Image (tube, helix red, strand yellow):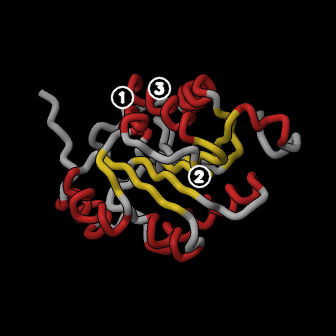
């Protein structure tokens, strides 16, 4: 029998506080990278961010510090995280494969799905990528680990997919890679210089 994964306070304490997977400095660099890449792609300041699988919404205060006027919306399946942080960080209960049911005010300049794709069963991942594309107006920042990566952290329900499998799923959803976990809509390809995208 498969054990149900609980994203409660104990989970967030274990993986984001007690174990300290990824330091505050690591997270700040990651957020700054995603903001900079989005603004470079759009050639203007960031205005809106959708954070899918936001957890406690740890991106929100960092984004607010960098771009105080940017609108942030977070989505997570953890009832605990949303009840604890939802009001303060604009989080709502939901899942990546049902974003169209949440009344989100998209499209968003930046859509983040950080460190969640490798936990999603393939049908949910495929459906979720279609939902992400529907909300995307600029850059999708999608950090994920493959079966070939040496991962540290939560291995429960980890999906051992190859990099080629991820690329195929994201390409089928209508995305093209920009490097460093960044993707954009295939429709933007004519606007990119030849070396901006590896495809």
Q: Residues within 10 Å of mark 3 (few under 14, many from 20)?
A: some
Task: Name the mark nearer the viewer: 1 or 2.
Answer: 2
User: Callout 3: helix, strand or loop?
Assistant: helix
Task: Name the mark nearer the viewer: 2 or 3.
Answer: 2
In whole angstroms, how far apart are the C-alphas of marks 2 and 3? 19 Å
Q: Earlier in the sequence, mark 1 or mark 3?
A: 1
Residue assigned mark 2: 110
User: Callout 1: helix, strand or loop?
Assistant: loop
Task: Name the mark nearer the viewer: 1 or 3.
Answer: 3
- Residue 4: percent from left, percent from top: 16, 38
In the displayed structure, 128 sits above or below 191; it is: above
In the displayed structure, 72 sits above or below 123; it is: below
Residue assigned mark 3: 126
- Residue 25: percent from left, percent from top: 50, 74
Quick one: quadrant of the C terminus? Answer: top right
User: Callout 2: helix, strand or loop?
Assistant: strand
Say the numbered circle drawn on residue 4: none
- Residue 146: percent from left, percent from top: 49, 38
Q: Identify which residue is drawn at 17% across, 60% down.
A: 10
Quick one: quadrant of the N terminus? Answer: top left
In whole angstroms, how far apart are the C-alphas of marks 1 and 3? 9 Å
Residue sticking out furthest to the bottom: 65
Q: Earlier in the sequence, mark 1 or mark 2?
A: 2
Q: Identify which residue is drawn at 41% across, 42% down.
A: 103
Q: Identify which residue is drawn at 38% across, 28% down.
A: 124
């Amino acid at each position: 029998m498969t054990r149900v994964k609980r994203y409660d306070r104990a989970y967030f304490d274990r993986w984001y506080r007690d174990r300290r997977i990824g330091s505050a400095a690591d997270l700040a660099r990651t957020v700054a990278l995603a903001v900079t890449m989005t603004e470079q792609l759009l050639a203007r300041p960031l205005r809106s961010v959708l954070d899918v699988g936001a957890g406690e919404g740890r991106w929100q205060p960092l984004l607010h510090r960098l771009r105080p006027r940017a609108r942030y919306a977070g989505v997570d399946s953890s009832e605990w995280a949303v009840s604890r942080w939802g009001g303060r960080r604009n989080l709502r209960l939901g899942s990546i494969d049902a974003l169209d049911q949440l009344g989100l005010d998209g499209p968003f300049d930046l859509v983040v799905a950080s460190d969640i794709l490798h936990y999603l069963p393939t049908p949910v991942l495929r459906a979720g990528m279609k939902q992400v594309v529907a909300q995307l107006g600029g850059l999708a920042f999608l950090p994920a680990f493959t079966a070939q990566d040496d991962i540290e952290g939560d291995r429960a329900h980890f999906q051992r997919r190859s990099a080629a499998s991820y690329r195929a799923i994201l390409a089928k959803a209508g995305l093209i890679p920009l490097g460093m976990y960044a993707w954009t809509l295939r429709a933007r390809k004519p606007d990119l210089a030849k070396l901006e995208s590896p495809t």
